[in-house]
Image: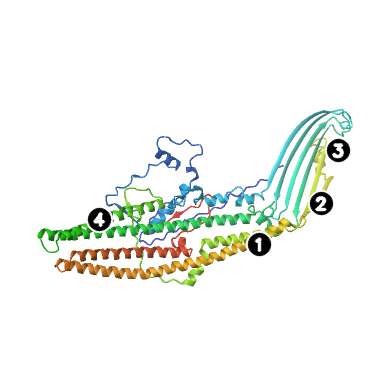
Amino acid sequence: MALPTRTSGIGWLAGLMMLACGCASHDSPSAPSVWQPLDAVPLHAPVPKDNAAAQVRFLAGESASPPPSLRPRNTAVEPTDFVDMTRQQVIETALRDSRVIRDLGGRVLDSPSAVTTRYDFALQQTDPFYGPQAALAEFDTVLNSSLTAANNDRVFNNAVLGGGAQELLQDTLSMQSGLSRRLPGGGVVSLDRRIDYDNNNRSANLFPSVWETQMEVGIRQPLLRGAGRQYNAIAGPNAQPGFQFSNGIVIARMNSQISLLDFERALQDFVSDVEDAYWTLQLAYREYEGKRVARDAAYQTWQAVKAKADEGLAGGEADKVSQAQAKYLMYRYQTLETLNGTRRQTGVLDAERRLRFLIGMPTTDGVLIRPVDRGSPAPLVYDWEAMLAEAMGARVDLRRQAIRIQQEEARLLAAKNFLLPQLDVIGRYRLRGFGDDLTGDGPRFASAYDDFFSLDHQEWEFGVEMQMAAGRRQARAAVQSAKLKIQRERAVWDTQQRLVTHELSEAVARVEVLQAGIQLTRQRMQAAEQRLQATRAQYDIGQSTVHLVLDAQEDFIEAQQRFIEASTDYAIAIKNVSLASGCLLRDRGVRLAETAYCVDIHTR
């Protein structure tokens, strides 16, 4: 008899695409970074022992040559080679290779198991114990079969015990196969087929050898506890009170949704960190350029004072020359600090290295990344009510907590089922056949198959089984626990909503404050520039002193620095509004979808 076969599903298949609509006039097309299972290093592959760099490249699955340069830059030399990148190009580059969500805290070294990767969702999907496929596997059709042959040679002290044979000589053969399947409503159906052969020397036998064949169909269907499609979808078969019902397909799929939301949250924070690093580098460049301009201006002032000293003119006194030289050397040192950074200040090279790490580029390749986007100082007006309503539906935290509440509500429904007694209906139908041979023609009992298909030997069984614990303490405790968990998750959700409102309000207020700050710092910078020009003009005609010129230069540099910081903070504050409203990924053109192996990213 041919047995039915069943083809199982292999999971979900989708993709994650990042639709990048850059604010620059040109696009940067790049090939998608797709996870290739065949590129992985074999489990027992030999690791080359030549040098550490070769081992690193081998373990990373790379066969190409290393990056152009891994040697640190000469920090005493001013950079001259740059590669200009827009904010959107930086985000695209970061997402092109985002198998591991990178951060600047070194967590990938300290706690690698806590790092978020593109594979976390697939790991949850393919969990053989608590994943969706494991939950569906409980309802798979199970095939069982066996073939057993035996030879017996036994002596009995009493021939009656041997069935009329003092020494029993027996050959047996048993072939058995069957199918069983658990139904969505909780019942179990089975179909079993069995063929037995027995050849022995018992004197009371009708035939020296005999074949028996039988087919049995059985069903066990719960009527109260464990019954129903809803309960089995939530709790899964063989569930017990108090467990989390992770074997239920409903709970397993909710866990998958939570895993995907966790990745979305990590990706959102990653994009935010990349954008922060971009604007920090932009700020470092503008501070560096400001210090360079101040250094050159101070040098010109020093040379002008020195020229007056050489000619013996008023304003060229030794103290004024020394003061101008000291001011020039101060700005020269500050230029070096803004380029390389200090313990208290982030320099251009520091900020550029951090951005390179975040976006997955080599530590150095001979050129410096230079941001070309500058945040727009144009004032923004937000629709508070519309933005708050959008945040309540878009924030990953609230969506994740809403799923947690749905999980606990589903678990409460399953827990109430355990208050019911166990009442199962059992039914079996059996058809037998008996004969001297398995097949063939002849009188009655000449063929076991003929006797089987004659339908002369039909048997059936029907019954009811019931079991119930007195007091149902465990079931009642499970229901009460489920109710308390729902109250807890709802309380957390209410607090999260208030916190989201607070964060969004704070982000919008920060934007409004910085809008005013930009206007004030711009006016201060313009006034300081006018004062510097007037002071220089007066100094050139001998109506001002070098002290006033240097003071005006310092005031202008300070005002310019405050304007640059306010402009950068304003760009970051606008980003933080998108982050607080839960729309950062959408605003940057990132879209998520499930995939069978990992969360993949395509850029265009």
Q: CA distance from mark 2 to mark 4?
A: 98 Å
Between 472 and 549, the residue placed more toward the observer is 549
Label at residue 100: none
Q: CA distance from mark 2 to mark 3?
A: 33 Å
Mark 4 vs mark 3, foreground winner is 4
Q: Please provide percent x and percent y for residue 72.
A: 33, 46
Name the residue at 23% across, 65% down: 551
Image quarter of residue 410:
bottom right
Between 240 and 168, the residue placed more toward the observer is 240
Q: Find numbered disc 3 in the image and state the secondary structure of the residue it sits on.
A: loop
**Mark found first going from the N terminus, 2 or 3:** 3
Q: Find numbered disc 1 in the image and state the secondary structure of the residue it sits on.
A: helix
**Mark found first going from the N terminus, 1 or 4:** 4
Residue for badge 2: 462
Residue sitting farthest toward the left: 311
**Mark found first going from the N terminus, 2 or 1:** 2
Q: Please provide percent x and percent y for residue 366.
A: 31, 48
**Left or right: residue 590 compared with residue 414:** left
Residue sitting farthest toward the front: 319
Residue for badge 3: 443
Residue for badge 4: 332
Label at residue 483: 1
Name the residue at 41% across, 55% down: 92
Mark 2 vs mark 1, foreground winner is 1
